[in-house]
Image (cartoon, rainbow, N blue to C red):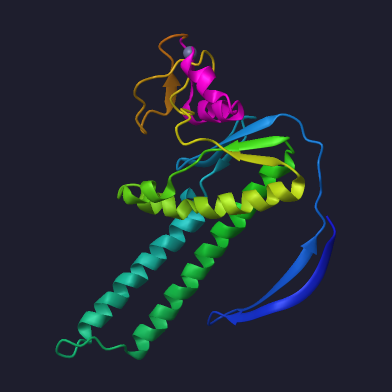
Amino acid sequence: MDKAYKSFTRVSFDGKYWYLSYTYEVQGQVTNGTGTMGVDLGIKDLAIVSNSDVYKNINKTNTIKKLEKQKKRMQRQVSRKYEMNKQGKEYVKTGNIKKLEQRIRLLDTRLANIRNTYIHKVTKGLVRTTPKKMVIEGLNVKGMIKNKHLSKAVSNQCFNKFRQYLTYKCQLYGIKLEIADKFYPSSKMCSCCVNITKRLSLSERVYKCNRCGLEIDRDYNASINLSRYGKNWKEIVYTH
Ligand SMILES: [Zn+2]
């Protein structure tokens, strides 16, 4: 891809590192891709693709877990120090507290950078398979974040960012990106016989069809269904 640097736009400093931001123009690459690819997004893995590729959840790696642990420890230290130095009802920010808070900020930046780089890597990997069309779910991220058992895991997956990066990369590669209707039963439908199960709890990792007997990883099943998504999905789903 040809890059033409245009201008430097911003210089920023986070207390340890300096950042230069710049814009550049990229010549779009229109690929002659074939087929439709379905991409199921999740918490167990980040993305499960109908071509059977799986992109892991980076938040389950040791690096991230270790950094999150460090951060928690420092946050506890800070609140302890605030309690210790309390004067009457007033909290006082001591030099040590300032230092710790700065370290927490740096950790946050590092975590954000790791997640961001990973999302770039995954979305790049997806568009490089050059399908003609890609279908992802219409995730109700706001609704998911309201579920207090899931909220942290969901926000750490950065689904909105994922969709944003995927959108512009698809444009760049000339891939049509479609967001499936949120009522499309990608998880509950059997990818073999179009039967729809009544119930499927999040803990059931294997999809079992009680009509044709198919047993398949639930996310993979969903990704296949997404790859078959089209405008006439209601006809296909409700007439079987
Ligand atoms: Zn079936």
Quadrant hosting residue 47: top right
- In the image, residue 190 lies at what x, y percent? 48, 19
Q: Eyeballing the image, is 218 above or below 75? A: above
Q: Residue at x 56, y 64 (%)?
A: 113
Nearer to me, 27 or 79: 27
On the image, the x and y values in percent for residue 73 come to 34, 68
Residue 174 screen position, x and y as percent: 76, 44
In the displayed structure, does residue 73 sit left or right of residue 120? left
In magenta, the rendered stretch is: 213-240
- Taking the magenta stretch, the answer to whether it contains residue 227 is yes
- 76 displayed left or right of 114: left
Q: Quadrant of the N terminus?
A: bottom right
Residue drawn where x is 57% and y is 59% of the image: 116
Name which residue lies at 63% across and 49% down: 166
Is 47 within the magenta?
no
Q: In this orientation, which residue lies closer to the viewer: 42 or 226? A: 226
Image position of 65 with respect to 89: above or below: above
